[in-house]
Amino acid sequence: MKFCWSTLFVNNMEESLKFYQEIIGLKEDRRFKAGPEMEIAFLGDGETKVELIWDAKNQDVNLGKDISLGFQVDSLDDMMTFVKEKGIDIHSGPFQPNPHV
């Protein structure tokens, strides 16, 4: 078995793409219309992707604590400063799942 992607439903595709590209640094792999009121984008340059889905019929996306994506950074302090400079509030964390991460 091979893990391919994680899917996140989003309320605003442009705002979400901006976050994952400018803040997280993921590159857009492909983006396409999946019908008249749906758009899908895959981000990432490795084997595993993040899939964003915007669906006009589903504007009640539950954005909450039930999703966790982990990223490694060279400097936590520099990344925290960068995120704050971009106007993104940090509501919790950072978290260290174990002493080796």
Image (cartoon, rainbow, N blue to C red):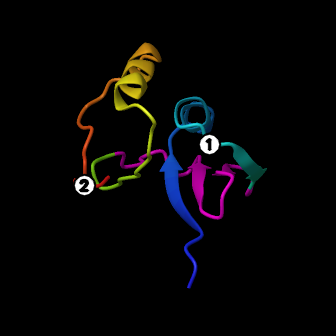
Q: Which mark is residue 26?
A: 1
Provide the secondary structure element on which disc 2 rests: loop
The CA distance from mark 2 to mark 1 is 22 Å
Nearest the viewer among 65 and 9 is: 65
Q: Which residues are magenta?
A: 34-63
**Quadrant of residue 20 within the rendered picture:** top right
The first of marks 2 and 1 along the sequence is: 1
Provide the secondary structure element on which disc 1 rests: loop
Which residue lies under the disc numbered 2? 97
From the viewer's perspective, is the residue at label 2 or at label 1 nearer? 2
Seen in the image, is 79 located left or right of residue 99?
Answer: right
Residue extending furthest toward the bottom: 1
Return the x and y of residue 52 as percentages of the image width and height. Answer: 58, 51
Return the x and y of residue 83 as percentages of the image width and height. Answer: 42, 23
Structural crowding at the residue carrying mark 1, measured as other residues with C-alpha within 10 Å and reported as few (<14), some (14–19) or many (≥20) = some
85 is higher (above) or lower (below) than 13? above
Q: What residue appears at the point 60 percent right and 63 percent down from the top-left corner? A: 48
Seen in the image, is 22 located left or right of residue 39?
Answer: left
24 is higher (above) or lower (below) than 55? above
